[in-house]
Amino acid sequence: MNLTNIKYLYDLMDKESFTFFTVYDSKGSPMRDQCNESYSVDDAKEDLQQFLQYNTGVFRVEFRRTRANTQQTKNYSFTVDNFKNEEEEKPMGSVMMGGNTDYVNIISSKDERIGQLQEQMYSEMVANLNKQHEMQLNAIKAEGANKNGNNDALIQAALSAITGMFGSQQIGVSGIETMEMPEMVETTENNNNMDDKTKKINNAVVRLIRGDKNFAEHITKLANLCDDNILIYNMAIAKLNNL
């Protein structure tokens, strides 16, 4: 017995404009007779598709060009095995024809959804961090504006970066009046105009100038980081404190 691919039936209906058909079971008994004259080809195709969706087995489908189906009517008969469609209706994850599975599509869909959720969480986290950074930056600026002193703000920020490494937040900058580094003279006990904290700062700066030929660029970057992104700056200081 020759079997016809079901898709061929739909293509034939389009090509020949078939709208009338009868479906017979394997014993020759009619199961569906489409004789509605108002049906278009698409209506007839949908009718046949719906029948095959809810019925399985071997069927004979006969197309005709007239509503009535008499002994003189010319029929175009095709036999289809509708058991094959069961493979298309198996639930996701079930074993498919030939031992293949649908796991790849399932995993791909889940991965895409997970990626979307991760991207959304990351965006929200960045937005929260930026908000916190902006609030802290505004607080620092307000605090700096309320402080009295004759020191330049940029000098204050640069020296804050250095002394922050030693856990100090209140900065003394007496004796340094320009962004260019002072003459490399280490402090001694005779420097009576400096307190102990300022002497410590001065000695540290002198040592850094001697040991780092790019100290000016490095200290500027650190100061900029302190001004522009206090969260990252604090992370860097915490890293240094753990060394």
Image (cartoon, grey):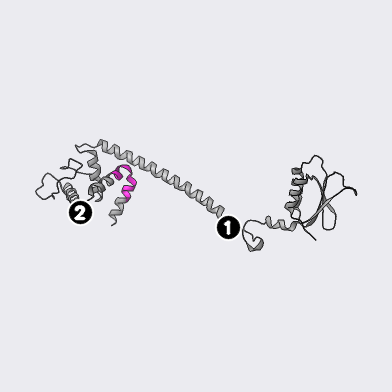
Give how far across and how far down residue 54 sits, in percent.
75, 52
Residue at image coords 47%, 48%: 119
Residue at image coords 45%, 45%: 123
- Asked which secondary structure carries label 1, the reply is helix
Q: Would you say residue 169 is visible in this rendering?
A: no
Residue 71 part of the magenta-drawn span: no
Give how far across and how far down residue 66 sits, in percent.
85, 44
Give how far across and how far down residue 94 sits, in percent.
64, 59
| Residue of label 2 | 211
Earlier sequence position, callout 1 versus callout 2: 1
Q: Which residues are drawn in magenta?
A: 224-235
- For label 1, the crowd category at 10 Å Cα-Cα, with few meaning under 14, some 14 to 19 and many 20 or more, is few
Q: Please, which residue is most extreme toward the front here? A: 15
Pick the residue in front: 100 or 242: 100
Real-space Cα separation, disc 1 to disc 2, in angstroms = 58 Å
Pick the residue in front: 138 or 120: 120
Residue at image coords 25%, 47%: 217
Left or right: 201 as drawn, with respect to 116: left
| Residue of label 1 | 104
Q: Is residue 130 above or below residue 62?
A: above
Q: Which mark is residue 144?
A: none
- Asked which secondary structure carries label 2, the reply is helix
Asked where in the image residue 44 lies, by quadrant, the reply is top right
Left or right: 114 as drawn, with respect to 89: left
Residue at image coords 74%, 53%: 6
Magenta residues, dominant SS class: helix
Q: Are marks 1 and 2 in contact (CB under 8 Å)?
A: no
Give how far across and how far down residue 143 sits, in percent.
28, 38
